[in-house]
Image: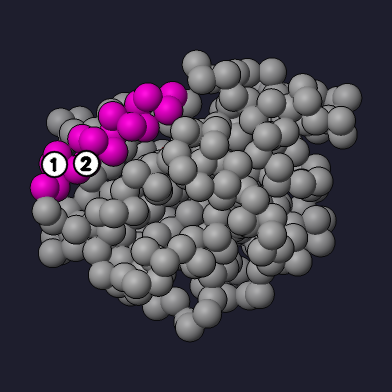
Amino acid sequence: MSTMVMTGGTSGFGAIAAGRLRCSGENRLLLGARNDPRPGSSCLPLDLADLGSVRAFANAVREELGDTPVDALVLNAGLVLADVARRTPDGFEKTFAVNHLAHYLLLRLLMPALGEGARVVLTTSGTHDPAMGAGLTPPRHADASLLAYPDRDPGLHDHPRKAGEHAYTASKLCALLTVRAMTEEKEMRDKGITAVAYCPGQVFGTGLAQDLPFYMRVVWSLMGSPVLSRPARRFDPTLNTRADAGDTLADLASGDARTPEGRVYAALRRGQLTWPEPSDVACDTNAARTLWQQSAELVGLPG
Ligand SMILES: NC(=O)c1ccc[n+]([C@@H]2O[C@H](COP(=O)([O-])OP(=O)(O)OC[C@H]3O[C@@H](n4cnc5c(N)ncnc54)[C@H](OP(=O)(O)O)[C@@H]3O)[C@@H](O)[C@H]2O)c1
């Protein structure tokens, strides 16, 4: 029996992954969510936009599990917003707070509960890499003090949508840098814990576009239909189905997909799991260490 803790398992390809992990009968899955739409199902309350809720969730997980170690921690939740205008109750820009800071805090709080050989999976995105030319504004930096308070960022885009895209792509760069920083943590090395940043490629038709303007939601939804997505996938290797993205996330969580020695970046291409070298920006060890320290300060933990 494997014990798993997951965020982002209520919608999109995360719901497919959660469904598969539950069905195997060999896993105990603790899902953190604002609400779980499945009738009769239960999950532990978690709103990643509120660090108090993250702390309460970590306590609830520890209470529920007692001495049972966590075998897999899957940090998949995420959002995209149309701008950087929204603030969390803690005062942070919302995309950065939900996608990075809350997951960082959860990871730190649950690290002691991770068992020997546990797996940690953070969902990232190829859009973090300026070289991908993915169409979204690429990250200029992963400076947590500026991402948390974008009004202080001298390079903040004038155009709200571009600023919103930057908040998203930078938060996904933070996921990769967090994985890199984790591999340097003594606790992680001593327990032989594997940390992976997972890029599902482009997966249309999920709930990710729900906060974007109407026309973008329509395109997102249409592109997720089999009629349009099937031919498009032939031309673009980064396009994947929700089923493939969810199954692969489940494989990474369960350990069915083994992480090759020294690899930290898993990317789904043409429905196949690949292990490319991370982008140049994601290999910056100094940026990774700085992000770890700055994030600790923002959530009130020692570095
Ligand atoms: N779709 C893509 O093309 C793509 C590409 C690269 C990376 N990704 C990443 O993949 C992950 C899953 O995305 P998706 O496309 O499957 O989108 P999705 O359907 O919108 O799923 C997002 C998940 O995050 C949860 N979530 C959002 N805000 C939350 C909050 N404040 N507290 C707790 N949970 C929250 C959602 O919960 P609710 O059900 O409560 O809303 C949902 O379970 C995200 O991290 C996304 O950035 C997606």
Residue 155 picture quarter? top right
> What amino acid is labelled 2 in the image?
Val
Is 73 left or right of 294, judged from the image as shown? left
Who is closer to the viewer here, 62 or 264? Answer: 62
Q: Which residue is mark 2?
A: 61
Residue at the spot 66% in from the left edge and 64% down from the top edge? 285
Q: Is residue 83 magenta?
A: no
Q: Which residue is mark 1?
A: 64
Who is closer to the viewer here, 57 or 302? Answer: 302
Badge 1 density bin: few <14, some 14–19, many ≥20, Cα 10 Å:
few
Q: Is residue 64 magenta?
A: yes
The chief SS type of the magenta part is helix
Badge 2 density bin: few <14, some 14–19, many ≥20, Cα 10 Å:
some
Residue 275 against residue 118 in the figure, above or below: below
Helix, strand or loop under label 2? helix
Residue 59 picture quarter? top left
**Which region of the structure is painted magenta?**
50-66
